[in-house]
Amino acid sequence: MFARLLDAAIVQTVRVVAIGLNPRLARANWNYNDKKSLPNPADPYTVEDKWMWRKLIDRSPVFIEISDKLGVRGWLERHGISVKTSEVIWAGSDAREIPDAALEGGVVVKANHGSAMNIFLPEPPEDRDAMTAKANSFLTRTHGERAVEWAYSAIERKIFVERFLPNATSEIKLYCFGGRVARIVAIFDRLGETTADVWVPDVGDTFKRSSVNAVVGEGRADRPLPACTDAAIEIAKEIGVHFDHIRVDFMSDDMSLWLGELTVYNLSGNFHGVQADEKEALNRAWDIRKSWFLTTPQTGWRKIYAAALLRRINARSV
């Protein structure tokens, strides 16, 4: 009895400190849950609290590497995961050094340390200086700072030029919890009037279209999953077994796949349509006992807290 009370006190202390030091993040969590439940990032039951826990507690060094749009390729190679990626033509720390030849033939100029930092160039730029200035401006941005997406800020910032895939107009986002895919978002016509659907597990290994609307696109697609989805699922499972949760994004022409990125913080840290209902499938799918924090020896207060948290999770999982 005393041990349980001590564990509760340890966890509650971490909760109070985490909320006190991060009021903006706590407020966002509270608002997202319609102000029905106070955040609990120290002993999380729901995905919203688990996102907050991941941001504040689970500081896995691997998150930095896989959030790096260049570094993730090395991670995949080291783990023997065979998947196509778009060709990188050039990478460096100053867009002024990009050779003119690297900007020919249809390319995308990107930053490696965040999202929404892309310049699509179906043709060489008419104003090279303006393109260079815009690309270098990406290096001054700290992606995800307000949302405490800390892994992005630790990436060594680079600009790179990637071969554009003109026929890859579909995108498949797979939400993995360990080696299990528990949600798919299929996006179509991503360079035009984008439509999308959410898919959830059905009987056996099949998926069914969800009534939940995707947050991307102009509306529902009401189209079958791309023909290559089964292949995407198998690759995503290979990747997913290394994490308690990861989103695996593919670009597709409906037949072939190219890995887009691995995403640690979905939508800056939430699942659209999933709130504080502990019975909701995604809340139950995410087992943080498989996280880096709870599978790697910790030191100091983290060691004491990790042991207390693990005992509490195991006790209610019996």
Image (spheres, rainbow, N blue to C red):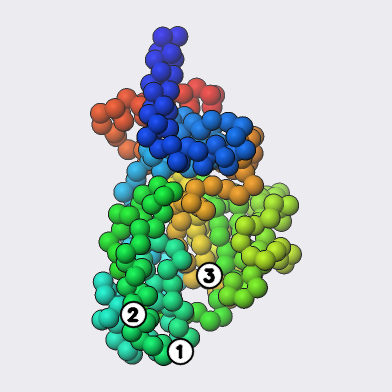
Query: Which residue matches tag 3?
Result: 251
Question: Of the residues shown, which amino acid type is indicated by label 2?
Answer: Thr
Residue that appears at 41% across and 54% down:
144
> Can residue 133 be seen in this snapshot?
yes
* Badge 1 density bin: few <14, some 14–19, many ≥20, Cα 10 Å: few
- 159 vs 286, left or right, is left
Assess disc 3: are there few (<14), some (14-19) or many (≥20) residues with their C-alpha within 10 Å of its C-alpha: many
What residue appears at the point 45 percent right and 89 percent down from the top-left corner? 123
Query: What residue is shown with label 1?
Result: 123
Q: Nearer the viewer, mark 3 or mark 1?
A: 1
> Circle 2 sits in a helix, a strand or a loop, which is it?
helix
Which amino acid, mark 1?
Glu
Earlier sequence position, callout 2 versus callout 3: 2
| The C terminus - image quarter | top right
Image quadrant in which you'd find residue 256: bottom right
Q: Alpha carbon of mark 2 to alpha carbon of mark 3: how far?
A: 26 Å
| Image location (x, y in percent) of residue 175 | 54, 53
Which mark is drawn over residue 132?
2
Disc nearer the start of the sequence (3/1): 1
Q: Is residue 1 above or below residue 170?
A: above
The local secondary structure at tag 1 comes to loop
